[in-house]
Amino acid sequence: MHSPRKILLTVSFLLMSFGMWAQESDRANDSDLLARLSYVNSAVVRSGGVPHVCVAVTRGGDYRMVRSTDDGQTLRLRGKIPQEQFQQLTKLLEESEFRALSGYHGGLIRQDAESFSAEIPEPMRAHADGTRRLPMERHAWRLQWLNADGENPFPGSVAKVVDWLQRFQPVGGKSFLYAEFPDVCPTGGLRLVQPAVAANRHP
């Protein structure tokens, strides 16, 4: 039988995952958005690291970040990504192996899990005179990958983006309020099943 601590940890992960997807779907002001990315790890409570991070990046290199620390604090920071790091991220997001992935890749969570999500809007279209405009309905490329209990490891291209997210340090970032930028995380929804919770109801 799974310990109450493990069950609580998994439930917390599920709530965090659902919570970070509960964002406004209106993206009309995202004309310059390059990508929204997120990473969540329920196991870092024991192993150390970044348990939860979301980053929204513009094509000009501006970022908005929401990050949880291992002591339960939530940081909301915005600023400019150094040029070298921005170029590295852009290259990772444009890799053919990465963009060949799509859809939802999940599984059952019995103990620990980590998830990655990406939302990359399609570029703005150009008029004949060179001015740009958004499509009437702006579509986006989306990816959701759940690695439950280490049974569905991230592909190499995803692991590289996750590594960038974990390593990025928002030096000089300025704090912002949730109400100012409520849509830092990607939109969508994780369809997760946690059998250990149900099993724990019956001795």
Image (cartoon, rainbow, N blue to C red):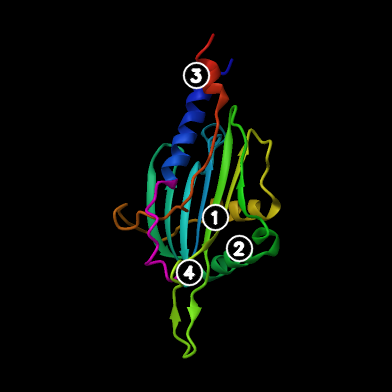
Which residue position holds label 1? 118
Checking the image for residue 93, the label placed there is 2
Q: Nearer the viewer, mark 1 or mark 4?
A: 1
**Helix, strand or loop under label 3:** helix
The amino acid type of the residue labelled 3 equals Pro
Residue position for label 4: 61
Residue drawn where x is 66% and y is 46% of the image: 154
Residue 4 is labelled as 3
Q: Position of residue 135 (x, y in %)?
A: 46, 72
Secondary structure under tag 4 reads: loop
Q: Secondary structure at mark 2?
A: helix
Q: How many angstroms separate mark 4 from mark 3 (CA)?
A: 43 Å
Label pair 1/2, CB-CB below 8 angstroms: yes
Q: CA distance from mark 2 to mark 4?
A: 14 Å
Residue 151 placement, left or right of 195: right
Q: Which of pointers 1 and 2 indicates the residue nearer the eye?
A: 1
